[in-house]
Structures are given as C-alpha cells and as structure tokens.
C-alpha cells in the first residue's frame, strides 16, 4: 500500500512530466532505480539528456522552511547526500546505456495546494545544473 507521501510524490512526478512534454521535452524513462539511487525522470530535448529530480512541496513543507507558498525551496530539498547519490546514479545510467552526449541536471519543485473546491493550485520552480 502506497503512503500519502508516495502518492503525493507520484502526483508531482506526473505533473512534472506534463510540464516537460508541454515545453518540448521527450520523456525517456521514469523512476530509473539502482542500488545507489534513483532518477525520477530522464528526458531529452535538442540532443541533450536531462536528469530530473522532482520535489513535490505542500503548504506544510513551505511552513517548515519558513517560505511563502510557491517560493523557491528546490535547493534546500536536494542536500549533499542526495546530490552525491544522484551523481552516482547518473554516471551509472550513462555507462549502462553507452551514452556519450551532453547532459544536464534539473530540479523541478511542484508546489501543490488543495483548494476548498477540491481543485489543486500548482506552481513550478525549475533549477538547472545544481549538481
């Protein structure tokens, strides 16, 4: 059984994929998982591979970081240990797939807030090359 946190993460990843596709990216793979870590989304655009870490943020998360709703907190959510794991899994993906082309790392924060009428208010923040 998936936890509420996992369901929220899955929602954020799906919304991030929609955002990427809407902006001309092709989704290559989701949830590339190895012992050393996981890449949420692997996408491409204009012959560049993008490794995407998705962080789904709620109002509760914003309160913890003392930020206003939708205010940038992506980097705070990807700490030293996470960056270290991501470097390893990106290297492994490139090696396994014999890829020798340009790549970038991207963090997408998906801010989700449930409104009174059961609709969601969504905002995105995108950061590149934070590894």
Image (cartoon, grey):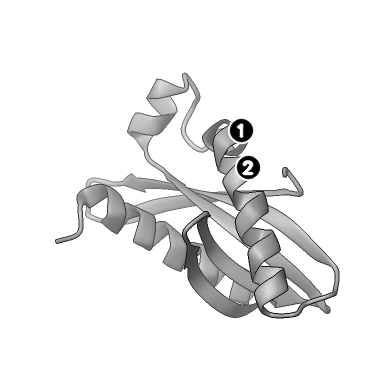
Q: Is residue 42 left or right of residue 55?
A: right
For the residue pair 47 and 65, the one nearer the viewer reads as 47
Q: Is residue 31 left or right of residue 99?
A: left
Q: Are marks 2 and 1 in contact (CB under 8 Å)?
A: yes
Give me the residue at 52% from left, 36% from top.
Answer: 77
Question: What is the crowding at mark 1: few (fewer than 14 residues within 10 Å), some, or many (at least 20)?
Answer: few
Q: In this picture, is 124 found above or below 16?
A: above
Residue 129 appears in the picture as rendered:
yes
For the residue pair 76 and 94, the one nearer the viewer reads as 94
Q: Residue 46's x, y, as percent?
A: 83, 78
Residue located farthest toward the top when viewing the structure as drawn: 66
Residue 73 appears in the picture as rendered:
no
Residue 72 picture quarter:
top right
Q: Residue 73's x, y, as percent?
A: 56, 33
Q: Which residue is mark 1?
A: 80
Q: Residue 57's x, y, as percent?
A: 43, 42
Numbered circle sitting on residue 84? 2
Q: In this picture, is 17 found above or below 130?
A: below
Label 1 secondary element? helix
For the residue pair 83 and 35, the one nearer the viewer reads as 35
Question: What is the crowding at mark 2: few (fewer than 14 residues within 10 Å), some, or many (at least 20)?
Answer: some
Give me the residue at 20% from left, 52% from top.
Answer: 3
Give me the residue at 53% from left, 70% from top.
Answer: 17
For the residue pair 50 and 12, the one nearer the viewer reads as 50
Which quarter of the image is occupied by the N terminus? bottom left
Between the C-alphas of marks 2 and 1, the distance is 6 Å
Give me the residue at 79% from left, 65% from top.
Answer: 103
């Amino acid at each position: 059984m998936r936890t509420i946190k996992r369901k929220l993460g899955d929602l954020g990843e799906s919304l991030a994929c929609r955002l990427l596709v809407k902006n001309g990216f092709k989704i290559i793979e989701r949830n590339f998982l190895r012992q050393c870590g996981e890449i949420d989304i692997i996408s491409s655009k204009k012959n560049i591979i993008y490794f995407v870490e998705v962080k789904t943020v709620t109002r509760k998360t914003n309160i913890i970081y003392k930020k206003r709703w939708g205010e940038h907190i992506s980097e705070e959510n990807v700490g030293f240990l996470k960056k270290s794991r991501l470097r390893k899994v990106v290297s492994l993906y490139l090696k396994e797939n014999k890829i020798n082309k340009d790549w970038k790392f991207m963090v997408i924060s998906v801010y989700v807030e449930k409104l009174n009428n059961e609709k969601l208010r969504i905002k995105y923040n995108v950061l590149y090359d934070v590894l």
